[in-house]
Amino acid sequence: MSRALTGKTALVAGATRGAGRGIAVQLGAAGATVYVTGRSTRTHRSEMDRPETIEETAELVTAAGGEGIAVQVDHLDPERVAALVRRIDEERGRLDVLVNDVWGADRLFEFGRPLWEQSLDDGLRMLRLAIDTHAITSHCALPLLIREPGGLVVEITDGTAEYNAAYRRECGYFYDLAKSAVIRMALAQSEEIAPYGATALSLTPGWLRSEAMLDNYGVTEETWHDAAKATPHFAISESPAFVGRAVAALAADPDRARWNGASLSSGGLAQVYGFTDADGSRPDAWRYIVEVEQAGRPADVTGYR
């Protein structure tokens, strides 16, 4: 897959940190030009109040071998998104890959509380951040993406369609709705863009070692195994590079249309394309969660990574 995306243009919406950053960097490693968007810059923090910035992500893309272009965009603002797409068209004349990864709602969902006990304002804000942003971005970007056949849309969510078919009670009403809706959005787009030779799908990472997750456990990417001592099932976790390599593999696959409308996982695609996480392993988190964690078995990743 090395340099397989040279000459291709990608937009990763929500690339400031986490999965979005990992995806942007791996697309860059495959040679793509990547527009990385988000609200957090070196001079302005979003409501997430995290230190990561889109400029850092763009620099990582370039260091990986691609060209990273940082653009501050609030994807709830249709005019800003439309201006971004016009810029991509003017500068590149094409859009080959669209990744909708906007989220920014970690602080808004409440574990283990029924709908009527949750904050309505926070819940509705979560839906705006998780659903409206994706719809606005696709609405603006799809006309450019379908101009030439071969375009790819990747909707990033949490959980596969199979896993999310059951209500995710521990996460609650708004989170469950948001993550399931994104899967449906990918399905809808797959039907609408297929006649133009384009592909849309949803993709979920497993237990992601995002910057915030590492901070929560008081570890770094280099010392993450220490967190598994207190939380044994964390041993199945994966770095953002893993889902990034999944997107890069999809974008480089000339037969990517076979996945049109599908709900996929990083661990599942690793078995198909043969890529690994940064440590050389292939964690299959969603299979592990069902077969080990939810089954009440002791933590043991043997056969799962």
Image: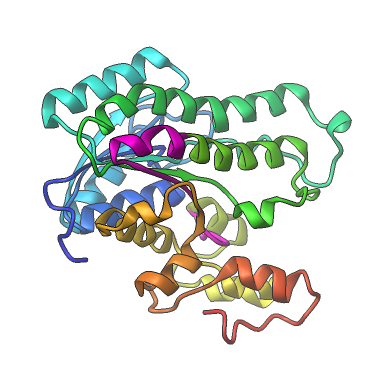
Residue 165 locus on image (x, y percent):
71, 50
Picture quadrant of residue 292: bottom right
Which residue appears farthest toward the top when viewing the image?
79
| Residue beneath the point at 53% across and 65% down | 219
- The answer to whether 98 is drawn above or below residue 73 in the figure is below
- The quarter of the rendered structure image containing the N terminus is bottom left
| Residue beneath the point at 55% across and 61% down | 206
Picture quadrant of residue 142: top left
Residue 231 locus on image (x, y percent):
69, 71
Which residue appears farthest toward the front when viewing the image?
195
Q: Between residues 211 and 97, which one lies in front from this camera angle?
A: 97
Residue 6 locus on image (x, y percent):
13, 52
* Residue 277 showing in the rendered view: no
- The answer to whether 143 is drawn above or below residue 10 in the figure is above
Magenta highlight on residue 101? no
* Residue 176 showing in the rendered view: yes
Task: Specify whether 255 is left or right of 234.
Answer: left
Q: Which residues are magenta?
A: 189-210
| Residue beneath the point at 20% across and 23% down | 87
Picture quadrant of residue 89: top left
Task: Specify whether 87 is left or right of 227.
Answer: left
- The answer to whether 18 is drawn above or below residue 197 in the figure is below
- The answer to whether 305 is drawn above or below residue 88 in the figure is below
Q: Between residues 116 and 142, which one lies in front from this camera angle?
A: 142
